[in-house]
Image (cartoon, coloured by chain):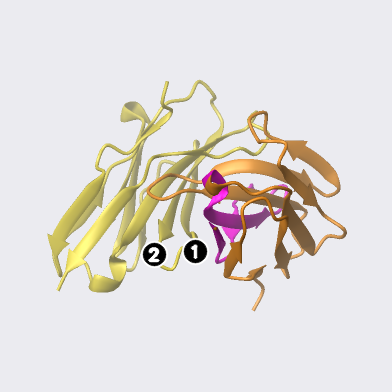
């Protein structure tokens, strides 16, 4: 069974629009970590955020914000006032503490920001 | 700046000709990882080192080997590359107790002719 689901394969918006990328996860662990990574066309995976299962506070970093809700097992990512440089593939990932360091990756969402 | 470095960024090899990809890090992290990523897919973990302790994923082909001569360097050896091994290879590091955030290098794109 898929443990990290990113149902949106591709999203296309016009610059300056807000956009939300969805991530739903499944785990039986009480202690786990959730991550978002950005992969621009150059290929490097850029770490954006880490959240542990005990910290449900939402986080804002500039135009980026994250909404973690354990009740719905979701960890959604919103970009406000999108820019062309935000165009990339975004991955959500889960780390379970007994996983021997293996991240469980979502399939990724390709975000296209049109000028 | 502390970072994860991969060389080369692009590697072309011939079918069956051994190839080595390299990764170095200045983060002094004790865990290093190698991932394979094919087009439009999520990265797939091949193996990782916790210090010198090697951990191979069960489905990693025997064709793939790795060496970690010291904390800073890690190598991926592909003994007999096939056409299906053409992919992006990503190196990552993490520090035990960070907790476990993985930091990635820019990747090496391998082309097999």
Q: Position of residue B110 (x, y in %)?
A: 56, 59
Image: A12 above or below A95 = below
User: Residue B22 at what x, y percent from top left?
Assistant: 71, 63
- Residue at left offset 54%, top offset 24%: A29
Which residues are the magenta region? B84-112
Residue B112 appears in view: yes
Q: Which residue is mark 2?
A: A40
**CA–CA distance between discs 1 and 2?**
7 Å
Q: Which residue is mark 1?
A: A44
- Report the residue at 73% width, 66% height from top: B24
Q: Quadrant of the N terminus of chain B?
A: bottom right
Check disc 2 and report its element: helix, strand or loop: loop
**In the rendered image of this protein, which colour is used for chain A?**
yellow
Residue that lies at the very extreme toward the bottom in this rendered image? B1
- The colour of chain B is orange
* Quadrant where the C terminus of chain B is found in the figure: bottom right
Pointer 1 and pointer 2: residues touching (CB < 8 Å)? yes
The x, y position of residue B98, in whole percent, is: 66, 51
Residue B74 lies left or right of residue A54; in this view the side is: right
Q: What is the chain identity of the residue bearing mark 1?
A: A
On the rendered structure, is B83 left or right of B66?
Answer: left
């Amino acid at each position: 069974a898929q443990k990290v689901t990113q149902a949106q394969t591709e999203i296309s918006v016009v610059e300056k629009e807000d956009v939300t990328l969805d991530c739903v996860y499944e785990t039986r662990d009480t202690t786990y970590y959730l991550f978002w990574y950005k992969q621009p066309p150059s290929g490097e995976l850029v770490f954006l955020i880490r959240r542990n299962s005990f910290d449900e506070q939402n986080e804002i970093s500039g135009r980026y914000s994250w909404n973690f809700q354990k009740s719905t097992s979701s960890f959604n990512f919103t970009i406000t006032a999108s820019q062309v440089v935000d165009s990339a593939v975004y991955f959500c990932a889960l780390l379970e503490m007994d996983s021997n360091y293996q991240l469980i990756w979502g399939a990724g969402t390709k975000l296209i920001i049109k000028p | 700046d502390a970072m994860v470095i991969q060389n080369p960024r692009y590697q072309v090899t011939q079918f069956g000709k051994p190839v080595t990809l390299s990764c170095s890090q200045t983060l002094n992290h004790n865990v290093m990882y190698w991932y394979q990523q094919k087009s439009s897919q999520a990265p797939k973990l091949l193996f990782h080192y916790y210090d010198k302790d090697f951990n191979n994923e069960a489905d990693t082909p025997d064709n793939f080997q790795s060496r970690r001569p010291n904390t800073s360097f890690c190598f991926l050896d592909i003994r007999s590359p096939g056409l299906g091994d053409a992919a992006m290879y990503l190196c990552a590091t993490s520090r035990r107790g960070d907790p476990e955030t993985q930091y990635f290098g820019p990747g090496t794109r391998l082309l097999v002719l």
